[in-house]
Amino acid sequence: MSSIITSTVLAAGDGVPTAVILLIILAVVVIGVVMFFAQRYKRCPSNRILVIYGKTGSGAAKCVHGGAAFVWPLIQAYDYLELEPFVVPIDLTNALSQENIRVTVPTTVTAAISNQAGIMQNAAVRLLALSRGQIQAQAQDIILGQMRAVIATMKIEEINRDRQAFLGKVNEAVSMELEKIGLYLINVNIRDIEDESGYITALGRKAAAEAINQANIDVAEQEKSGQTGVAERQRDTRVAVADANATADIGEAGADRSRRQQVAALEAEAVSAETEADAKKAEYRANQNVAEQQARNRAESAARKADGAIRVAQEEAEKAAEEARAQREEARLNAEIVVPANAQREKVVIAADAQKQQAIRIAEGQAEAMLAKMTAEAKGIQAILDGKAQGYANLVSSCQGAQQLASLLIVEKLTDVADIQAKAIQSLPIEKIIVWDGGGDSQGMSGLGQRLMGALPPMHELARQVGLDLPEYLGKTASDAPAKTKPQPKKAPETDQK
């Protein structure tokens, strides 16, 4: 730091205050950036939940409880959820029980926003930016519905007799539903249970009357036992006094026998009374145990049915959520893959159709050009043939006969025939021709042309083959000249064969 100050002072002494100004500006900028980032670093107190929403990279919102997190500007925002408990008064009236009896159950429920990981996300999605009154209203609707559902699975006797079981079912049903919106159930306090028909009051009166009657029976039994004892004691006294006036031995014996008989009778009566009382107590306890077992079985069956119904509802809700997610995923895939693929396919189809139409247009143009060309050529050939036909017709009309016409046509083609014969002779390799001289008067090489011309068909013979006779100024064939006598070959003298 001292070196920086020293360099700054030296720079100022040198007359260069620009560096100092730049350093001050840089320091101000750095301090401003640090303060800005410090303001965006949010700490969450223990009685709140910090909800960061926007582009979080971890779902719809990021929840922080009891820590801190940095909130990026522009792409993120934040808000808080209060964790203080709140009381929801539930004035449940006219709820139908299993026997279709309307029950009134005034209740007070204490709840709060949950700070558990999964339930916190539900609260951030469904309760963020809601007031305390709006949250209480949503919780009140959910609690009323679940309490009515639980009461519908129980009888009034079960609700009145076993309130702990009823309270446990209410806690389980309400907690599960409140967690779906991010709330945690703290306590359920049932103030009273009443019904419009007075059934619960009648049950209380019945129990009180049974208790009073049983007490009166017990008092009467005790009074009866006391009076019987007193009478027996008085009678024993009188018998003892009378017997005392008799003979001592007989009186004593009789008194002793009477005493033993009375004692035995009293003990037998006492045993009989105790046995009867024990039998009644055992029968009452057995009936009570049977009734309690039946009520417990009915309660367990109703609880299982309620649990099954709740699970079925949860499965249906999860199924609906899965179907909604599947539809959303299908829509996303349709938008990201199917729609671009269809657009690309339409583009390819349109390009292919354009190329096809272009090829068709080119082919049609070429076909039309070819047709026009062939039509023109056909018209030219037709014109040539018409001209030839007209020329031949004029030639036929100017000639005196068919022989003269044929002669004129042959004369017209003699030039072509002579040209073809000249070309045939011209193309022969003269230097490779071997002449075999038979010793006649062919004059060797000098007669080669004459022999070649003799080998070609004469014009007069060609015309004769087609039934024409050339005029005499074209020459005559050798057959028309006088035939020369050929020398006869000499026969060899015959030799005798031995």
Image (tube, rainbow, N blue to C red):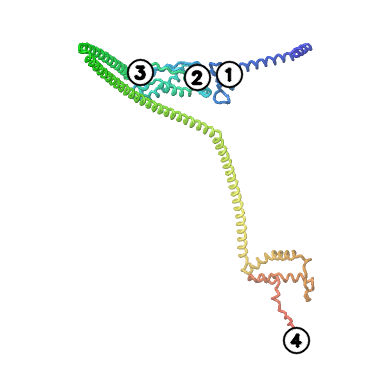
Q: Earlier in the sequence, mark 4 or mark 1?
A: 1
Judged left or right of residue 282, residue 123 is right
Query: Closer to the camera: disc 3 or disc 4?
Result: 3
Residue 245 on image: x %, y %: 20, 11
| Amino acid type of the residue tagged 3 in the rendering | Glu
Residue 453 on image: x %, y %: 73, 70
The residue pinned by badge 3 equals 194
Is the C-beta separation of discs 4 and 1 under 8 Å? no
Q: Nearer the viewer, residue 67 or 325?
A: 67
Q: Earlier in the sequence, mark 1 or mark 3?
A: 1
- Quadrant for the C terminus, please: bottom right
The residue pinned by badge 4 equals 493
- Label 1 element class: loop
Q: CA distance from mark 3 to mark 4?
A: 173 Å
- Quadrant for the N terminus, please: top right
| Amino acid type of the residue tagged 1 in the rendering | Gly
Residue 82 on image: x %, y %: 51, 17
Q: CA distance from mark 1 to mark 3?
A: 48 Å
Judged left or right of residue 354, residue 168 is left
Quarter of the image holding residue 40?
Answer: top right
Q: CA distance from mark 2 to mark 1?
A: 17 Å
Query: Closer to the camera: disc 2 or disc 4?
Result: 2
